[in-house]
Amino acid sequence: MLGGKGNGASQVQHTAPVPAHAVRFTTPVVETPAAFILGRWAWRLLAFLVALPVRYPLSVASVAVLVGSWWVLDWIGPGVVSTVTVVGGLAWRHWHPASFRRWVGLRSLALVRGVWVYRRHWQPVLVVSGLAESYLERQYLPRIRSVTCSEWADRVRVKLVPGTAPSDFEERTPQLAHGFAAPACRVEVLGPLDVVLEFPRRDMLADPIPALPVPASADYVDLGALPMGRCEDGRTWTMRLHGTHVLVAGVTGAGKGSVIWSAVRAMLPAIEAGLVRVRAVDPKRMELSYGRALFHRYADEGVACVELLEEAVADMQARAERYAGLVRSHVPSLEDPFEVVVLDEVAFLTAYHPDRDVRRRAENAMATLTSQGRSVGFAVVAALQDPRKEVLNLRNLFPDKVALRLDEASQVDMVLGPDARGRGADAHLIDPAAPGTAFVRLEGSKIPTRVRAAYVSDADIDTMAGGTDEASRGGEG
Ligand SMILES: Nc1ncnc2c1ncn2[C@@H]1O[C@H](COP(=O)(O)OP(=O)(O)OP(=O)(O)O)[C@@H](O)[C@H]1O
């Protein structure tokens, strides 16, 4: 059953003896006549040739055209076909570079890398990393189904050996990444026995991303998808804020400020229009004080911070009372704007403040805001350096989390959830020279995605706070 074609297992010669059993039952060795073996090879060759036009239609068609033209016009035929193809290809590349890259460039790359990198090294890498399975003294390998290339990564679709699980691959992502000379490896489960291994080819996030354009007007502000920066596949990283709370964790210098400011920047026209109000808690007095003018309320001293939080709780409860039985979901308006409470270094209030009463009141206010605020249009964005439980008991009240560079591997799962590191979210290995880089779980995906927040400089914040950033305003945000 394991060796059957449909189940994705391919049988290979075993390279290591199975440890001796107390009692060994072995199948008798029967000499196979050479005719059988040759017949089987011939059958396989025939099946391969028949499947060829289906598996590689473009390549087979090209060869057929070349041979056909040679048949009809002798050597002039292939010469004419090649010239037309090259000139046509160059023209295509010139006029439609994007479609040429998608249909020709990336497909050719996938063909070459599929053979040269993955199929060539597949068996040794999998055997050495412990992903080859043994059964009745034979070894079985997961089978490569296809290799495709995107702008930034190779995606190797694999059919697993029955009896194994995707977690076997998830546990060996470092071995696989090193084995195929890639900077990382991520595992995506498509279905039973069906996984994709994603190997980045280059880092799309290596260079800092300048602050994104401010949306042209409040109409273009989408509180469910604020543009924050870039994903590792080159797409824009968008973050939902309305209807959720966001926890941003990262060591000092990891770039928590750029996440907070990118969110504020993406909401700027709505803030100016009065549809969004930001209350800022800034105990470090460094990060948020720059943009004071943008905030509805601002506090930087322990007791004042707690009072700000308690006022937000009172406003939230008043709104909840008005909505009770009448409104099911909040829509931002001038009367009831979307209220965002931004807390920089939340542990200062919940763990480090010397006054126990301040710590308790801060924790209570945050717990109330995060547990009751979502449906009435209150969101909390909290940044912290140390995600350990004793520092912030409320971690689980934040549905969305951003894991910037962290100190220890164990903190990754604390921030992103128990299986995050197994799925490739190595936030503890983020390069300190690339602040703003983080792992997040995008909506609808279990796989953590690597992103980088755009860098909103002090000058950008000054311009935002002065309301003079017309030049940087974009179209649809
Ligand atoms: N997204 C980014 N892209 C490029 N550089 C960045 C980015 N974010 C931050 N930096 C750089 O890293 C430095 C530290 O960033 P930031 O102050 O936001 O870190 P932090 O996590 O808030 O640190 P702390 O907890 O000490 O305040 C910034 O001064 C800036 O030079």
Image (spheres, rainbow, N blue to C red):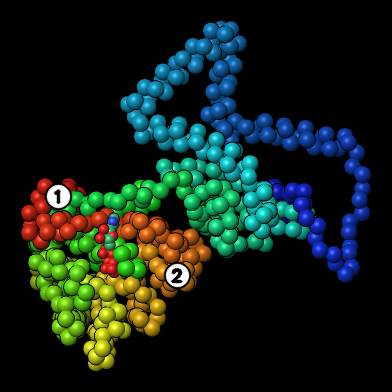
Residue at image coords 37%, 27%? 93
The answer to which image quadrant residue 428 occupies is bottom left
Judge whether 282 appears above or below 71 on screen: below
Q: Position of residue 133 (x, y in %)?
A: 71, 58
Residue at image coords 14%, 65%? 290
> Which label is found at residue 321?
none
Name the foreground residue: 377 vs 111. Answer: 111
Q: Is residue 355 left or right of residue 123?
A: left
The answer to which image quadrant residue 303 occupies is bottom left
Mark 2 C-beta closer than 8 Å to ligand 1: no
Judge whether 233 appears above or below 310 on screen: above
Name the foreground residue: 175 vs 27. Answer: 175
Residue receiving disc 1? 473
Badge nearest the viewer, 1 or 2: 2
Mark 1 C-beta closer than 8 Å to ligand 1: no
Residue receiving disc 2? 408
**Quadrant for ligand 1?**
bottom left
